[in-house]
Amino acid sequence: MLQIGDHVLTKCEKGWRAIFSELIAWWLHSKFSHVMPVVSESGDVLDITLPKPKITSLAEWFNGNYRVMILRPVTPLTTSEQIKFISTAQQIRSRDYDLKSFLGFLENNPTRDPKKINCAEGTLLCDQSAGILVHHDGVLISPQSYDDYADGGLFQVIYGCNCPTPDDFKALVTK
């Protein structure tokens, strides 16, 4: 069963999107190219991508084309924290996505528009609003790689599959 506050890491493995996905993963030194926070137990996620962030069903990534890993906060979110997490996700929907935004991981990036957002930044904002502070070696971080979500000790892997199917999604949300 999915929980509000879970993180979904994905990477396209098939089709034309796989080229772009591989490039992002390579740039970020990660096994994944995208992260989405879970905003409902039925499997809705905040997908921060072009042209604007949107709430969509995680089922879209269970089509046999994506590698998927789901991380869960080690300490479950309280109801109050879940409300803050969802509220932040809703606010992020009003921002634009900047294709150059993954360069925002570089300090002092002069091309970075602070009004725009990328998936890691949006997920981190949701986490921080709920009191989840991502650390690495004791230092508060802005994730440099999607793998940093798992390396800080605040999350545990609850699901991992190469190219899951719609039936896998049904099993996941009905556990």
Image (spheres, rainbow, N blue to C red):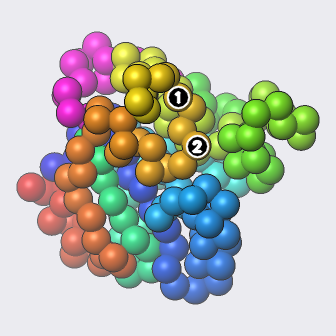
* Residue 89 seen in the figure: no
Residue type at the position of mark 2:
Gln
Q: CA distance from mark 2 to mark 1?
A: 8 Å
Up the image or down, 156 lies above or below 22; here it is: above
Q: Residue 55 location in percent, x, y? A: 49, 45
Query: Residue, x 40% and y 71% (percent of image)?
Result: 67
Foreground residue among 107 and 115: 107
| Label 1 sits on residue | 141
Query: Residue, x 42% and y 67% (percent of image)?
Result: 61
* Residue 108 seen in the figure: yes
Q: Residue 74 location in percent, x, y? A: 21, 33
Residue type at the position of mark 1:
Ile
Q: Is residue 18 magenta?
A: no
Determine contact: label 2, label 1, CB under 8 Å. yes
Q: Residue 160 location in percent, x, y? A: 27, 64
Q: Residue 141 location in percent, x, y? A: 52, 28
Residue 163 located left or right of residue 42: right
As drawn, the residue found furthest toward the right would be: 110
Say the numbered circle drawn on residue 144: 2
Magenta stretch: dominant SS?
A: helix
Query: Residue, x 56% and y 32% (percent of image)?
Result: 142
Foreground residue among 126 and 86: 126
As drawn, the residue found furthest toward the top would be: 80
Range shown magenta: 73-89
Query: Residue, x 45% and y 18% (percent of image)?
Result: 129
Q: Is residue 84 magenta?
A: yes
Check disc 1: other Cα within 10 Å, few if <14, some if 14-19, many if 20+: some
As drawn, the residue found furthest toward the left would be: 175
